[in-house]
Image (cartoon, rainbow, N blue to C red):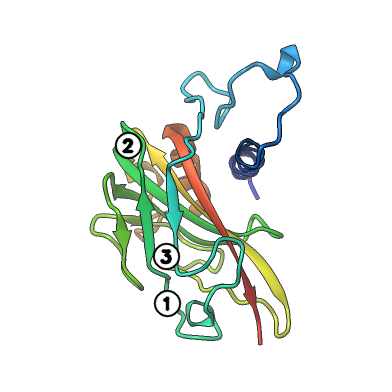
Amino acid sequence: MTARRTQLLGVVILLLALTACSRDGRVLAPATPEQNESIAIAPTESSVSLEPSEAFAIRGPWIDGADIDLAFTCYGRNVSPPLEISAQPPGTVTLAVLLHDVETPDRILWAMANITGGTVAIGEGATPPDVVVATNSDGNAAYQPPCPSSGERRQYLLTVFALDKALDVSGITNADGQVDADALLTAVEMSTFDLAESTFYVQAP
């Protein structure tokens, strides 16, 4: 797992924790001087500070934090779930989607970018036109269905990123025409300015 991927996923987890506190009525303690700086995806001059909006949301065929239908796992039809994306922030040029195992963050199941801004739905098993799909942890440029061991229950995090531009992936495309997830996430992190998430569990039979 690269440092950049660790950083990106770490920011996602931190932002989700902060957002949860802001929505359940709890009051955060006053920030210390070193905490008053804006959160950024990466500590570079080209980074954009993240100020996640509460309205921006991604939804799938599950109740947030509950179990997903096994049809979308290796125990079912091995097909990607339909998604609904709402309240995209102003300035969204493209979107990116990341699905990974919460307990094993380097286990990437689905990573795609250059989804046209304004896209409000992605159909079951569908890939929007002109979208870049990176190789998952199994080395395939496709949706990898969650597949916990028999009897195991695991948690997964689906994140949608709002980007301020379309990504030029020509420089990170391999000789075989594929884009590695690490390289794509590095490109995504440099242009992300907002994000939304949804979690679900898979209970393996």
Seen at 63% across and 17% down, the residue is 37
In this view, the residue farthest toward the top is: 33
Q: Name the residue under label 2.
A: 92
Identify which residue, 64 or 163, lies in the foreground. Answer: 64
Q: Quadrant of residue 87?
A: top left
Q: Do the residues labelled 1 and 2 touch (CB within 8 Å)?
A: no
**Marks 1 and 2, how far apart at CA:** 27 Å
Element class at badge 1: loop
Which of the two labelled residues, at mark 1 and mark 2, occupies the earlier sequence position? 1
Separation of residues labelled 2 and 3 (CA atoms) = 25 Å
| Front in this rendered view, residue 166 or 30 | 30
Q: Is disc 2 placed on a helix, strand or loop?
A: loop
Q: Which amino acid does label 1 sit on?
A: Val
> In the rendered structure, which amino acid carries the disc numbered 2?
Thr
Residue beneath disc 3: 141
Position above or below: 62 against 13: below
Q: Name the residue under label 1.
A: 79
Q: Do tag 2 and tag 3 residues touch (Cβ < 8 Å)?
A: no
